[in-house]
Amino acid sequence: MLDKTGKIIYVGKAKNLKNRVSSYFVGVHDDKTTRLVKDIFDLKYIITTSEKEAFILEINQIKKHRPKYNIQFMGDNTYPYIEITDEKHPKLIISRNIKKNRKNCFGPFPDSKSANQTLKVLNIIFPFRKCDKLPKKVCFYYFIKQCLGPCEYIVDQNVYKEMRKKVRSFLSGNIKEYIDLYKNKMDKHAKNLEFEKANELKNLIAAIIKTTEKQQVVFNDNLNRDIINYVAYDNYVSVNILFMRQGRLLFAKSKIFTFYLNPEEVLLNYLVEFYEKNIIPNEIILPHGYDYQIFNDVLNTTVFTPRRGRKLKLLEMAKVNAEEHLNNNLASFLRRENKTIGAISDLEKLLKVDIIKRIDVFDNSNTSGMDLVSAMVVFTNGLPDKKQYRKYKIKTVDKSDDYHIMQEVIYRRYQNVLLEDLEKPDLIIVDGGIHQVNAAKEILQNLKLEITIIGLKKDRFHKTNSIITADNQEIGLDKRSNVYSLLYRIQEEVHRFAINFHRNVAGKSIYSSILDTIPKVGKVTKDKLLRKYKNLNNIKKASRDELKALKISEEAIDNLYLALNDKNKN
């Protein structure tokens, strides 16, 4: 479905396309479906050879075009996993990118805190490599038996293979041997009056129990399962996923979506997106009443719809969780939606623009005309799209001149958009008044680009109070409105992003200038130090051995300690 500007606003599929499309134009619908129908200006369709092909095409088209009325369905869930890296000398890390080595990933974990707590325990028990890069000599971890010292000693690959098995067994709840081992060590330390060491082991035992203390074992087959159910109300659907690993129920996660006409299709679209980012379990349990064959074929896993037994009870539990989440969170979901989708609709009316899906926002930053930078943030359908953010170091302006800085950045950005055929925004916002708007407007005209542009004008208290349009009109903003809330969030985000970038650039500039004054610290040494330690404080804390490992001379290290007032290092 396309709007009158030719933009795709909705993608769907159907066995009988005529009946499906007709259903949108017949009968009474909710407000959201009515708004969708109102925006439809044209229809295009593609005939496929199978239902599976249509399903895959629909998902790909939604991901590619991110239509206004589909984007809110797409899930952004990525859960942390603990991964054993696929290297000669592996290490344990937390990863959200789990496609590269699925068999050595463990999880998911409900959040980063839980994953970090588990990783800390595993790193104490299992002596995997700890360093990012192998040093020349063994470090502290080797001497406390938390690393095998592959930097200095040969480690048989079978040792790592056995450690991988033990990690898997440990996370499955087989912890008795470790508890017994550390209890014996704790008792010995206590008898020798080594109470500090005994207390450390006591804390480790408590951490092991807490880490593996999941819910009861439901199935003894040690399989990984996701149990998924949903409830629909009005035009909202609440989905709940119960994560079961090695037969144990770990945690549950719920999410609310808007849907049009068919909640089952929303569920399937969301799950395809979800399993592109998360490990597919051995079995997915879904409610009866829908043909999941396409879903099964696409994910290449077992989809089971139970009619009785423990699996049905788990499915009912997921439904209760979905219902509870909808009851408790629908009001807050609606408030957020009004501040995003609702605010975008209001902004379209205010600016007399047919559709605003993508907004590019620019802000400049400098300190007394030094370290000139600019930044662009992108909001899609009222939400930040951080993958599209961009940073710019100013090249053609050497003093604080907002007009020409804005011109350089707008030119660089949209010349690139034209050359690489990138997505154009529906609206450009510059953080400033008519001066900045005119600067951007002039460049857009030279590039022959017709894009609506506005500035955000501040009052004497430095608070945004009005919109400045390209034809120098001022539109006052009601601070209680959803439009104001949206523009305020956008302005705060671009300001935060620009300031952080500027601080980073300015900080490096300061550190570089200080390092430039130190004898025997040349450009190569300076680059090594800043690349590894980022700032002077970290360089101060670096040990002599660490600096030697960077191949820095003894004389340069002495001069560094003297210059950074750290003469007591040894």
Image (cartoon, rainbow, N blue to C red):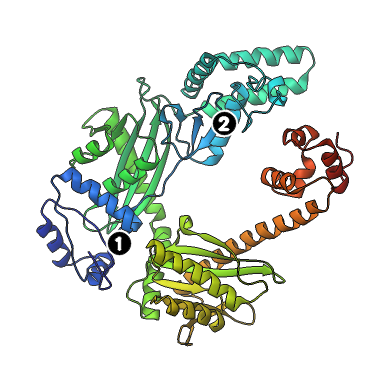
- Residue drawn at point x = 38 percent, y = 22 percent: 222
**Image quarter hosting the C terminus:** top right
Q: Which residue is mark 2?
A: 119
The crowding category of the residue bearing disc 1, from other C-alpha atoms within 10 Å (few below 14, some 14 to 19, many at least 20), is many
Residue 268 image point, x, y percent: 27, 45
- Residue drawn at point x = 32 percent, y = 29 percent: 282
- Residue drawn at point x = 48 percent, y = 73 percent: 429
- Residue drawn at point x = 40 percent, y = 80 percent: 350
Q: Which mark is residue 315?
A: none
Task: Name the kind of residue labelled 1 in the image.
Answer: Tyr
Tally of numbered discs: 2
| Callout 2 secondary element | helix
Residue 52 image point, x, y percent: 19, 43
Q: Quadrant for residue 153, please give it.
A: top right
Q: Is residue 365 above or below residue 325?
A: below
**Image quarter hosting the N terminus:** bottom left
Tag 1 near tag 2, CB within 8 Å: no
Task: Name the kind of residue labelled 2 in the image.
Answer: Leu
- Describe residue 26's horizontal placement relative to residue 261 as left or right: left
Q: Is residue 207 above or below residue 522?
A: above
- Describe residue 143's horizontal placement relative to residue 387 as left or right: right
Q: Is residue 488 visible?
A: no
Q: Which residue is mark 1?
A: 69
Q: Quadrant for residue 407, please give it.
A: bottom right
Residue 69 image point, x, y percent: 30, 61
Counting residues from the N terminus, which is met first, the one under dot 1 or under dot 2? 1
The crowding category of the residue bearing disc 2, from other C-alpha atoms within 10 Å (few below 14, some 14 to 19, many at least 20), is some
Residue 219 image point, x, y percent: 35, 23
Instruction: Name the foreground residue: 48 vs 193.
Output: 48
Instruction: Name the foreground residue: 551 vs 89.
Output: 551
| Callout 1 secondary element | loop
